[in-house]
Image (spheres, helix red, strand yellow):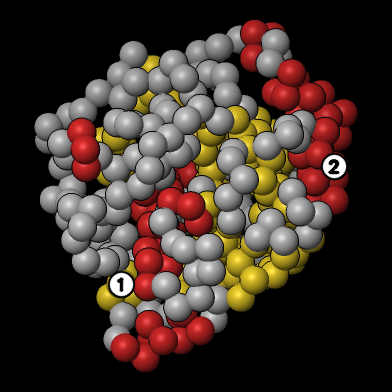
Amino acid sequence: MRRTLLPAGLALVLAVGACASSTPAPAPAPEPTAAPTASGPLTASRQDAGQVERTLASLRRVDELPLYEMTYDGAYDPTVGTDAGPARPFGCSLFAAAGDPGRPLFARNFDWDANPALVLRTDPPDAYASISVVDMSYLDVDADPAGDRRLLNAPLLPFDGMNERGLAVGLAADDGARADLDPGRATVGSVRILRLVLDRAATVDEAVAVFQRYNVDFQGGPPLHYLIADAGGASAVVEFVDGRLRVERGSGGWRALTNVPVVGVAEQRRREDRRYRTIAEALDRSGGVADAAAALKILADVRQAHTRWSVTYDLRGGEVRLTTAAGGAHSYRLPMT
């Protein structure tokens, strides 16, 4: 997000789970500098008129959540700022299952208010292609979003997603987290960092390096922690402890994240959280192996009254399976490189 710290009235508030390839790493996007005001023009799009028209024309409603799908045609600036409404605490459940090295999988429940959601495809010329899921309320679109140019900011708000290299990332609230700001680093919003990871990282190590290049700003929203996994079976939890970024890496087996800290916390203490314990016990029994059907069953076991979507990402095959609170079931495939 192109910004420094904003006055309180303008702060970005965003509420808030690799195959070898000859594909070159995308060139880095411009560093964030300053943000537009809430009344400023939409500036994320780097599209020509035809690309804008094709992007907006691709929007379609696919179930009664309501859930929409859209394909973004062309380029965007992943560092430009947007403004959103105030956040409230919420929960989420995520896990990475890599017990079968040939079938690593990333899964998550997104638990939040009853807002429309958007499955978004992006393939910018200077970054990795990805599929992500967006809570549309943070785009401030109308009840009927058809033709709404605010949809062009959708790439900036992935709440979870996977890119063409099999790198997946998702977020969850962590009430005790605090991220101090280093004046030597650019500052990005706590959801925007997911877009930078999806655009630039092919592995967990590269994703962690993206986090390490930026301050992550929790101002105005719930503090967060993050789960990352890749097609090579690596995984990591990124948390902020006593103001500093901390990382717990792993490979193979499984890794879970709910709304309790895990970095530096004993496993027995982690399992005092019911959702974490349910996930952990299921993956212990399977040896960390879960296909999409098994993962969705685990997610169903930890769903809450306010779970909006459940999604699985096949980190090698590229299949995405998503179910919604409205009962819809949807499948997508991202070509992998």
Relative depth, front residue between 22 and 218: 218
Which kind of residue does numbered mark 1 sit on? Answer: Ser
Left or right: 93, with 156 as reference point:
right
Q: Is residue 118 above or below residue 246?
A: below
Image spot of residue 161 (x, y percent)? 55, 54
Q: Quadrant of the C terminus?
A: bottom right
Which disc, if any, is residue 45?
A: 1
User: Residue 25 is drawn in which quadrant?
Assistant: bottom left
Q: Is residue 189 above or below residue 332?
A: above
Q: Residue at x 42, y 68 (%)?
A: 151
Q: Is residue 188 visible?
A: yes
Which disc, if any, is residue 297?
A: 2
User: Residue 153 is drawn in which quadrant?
Assistant: bottom left
Relative depth, front residue between 309 and 103: 309
Relative depth, front residue between 209 and 7: 7
Q: Residue at x 56, y 30 (%)?
A: 90
Label whose residue precedes the other's in the sequence (1 or 2): 1
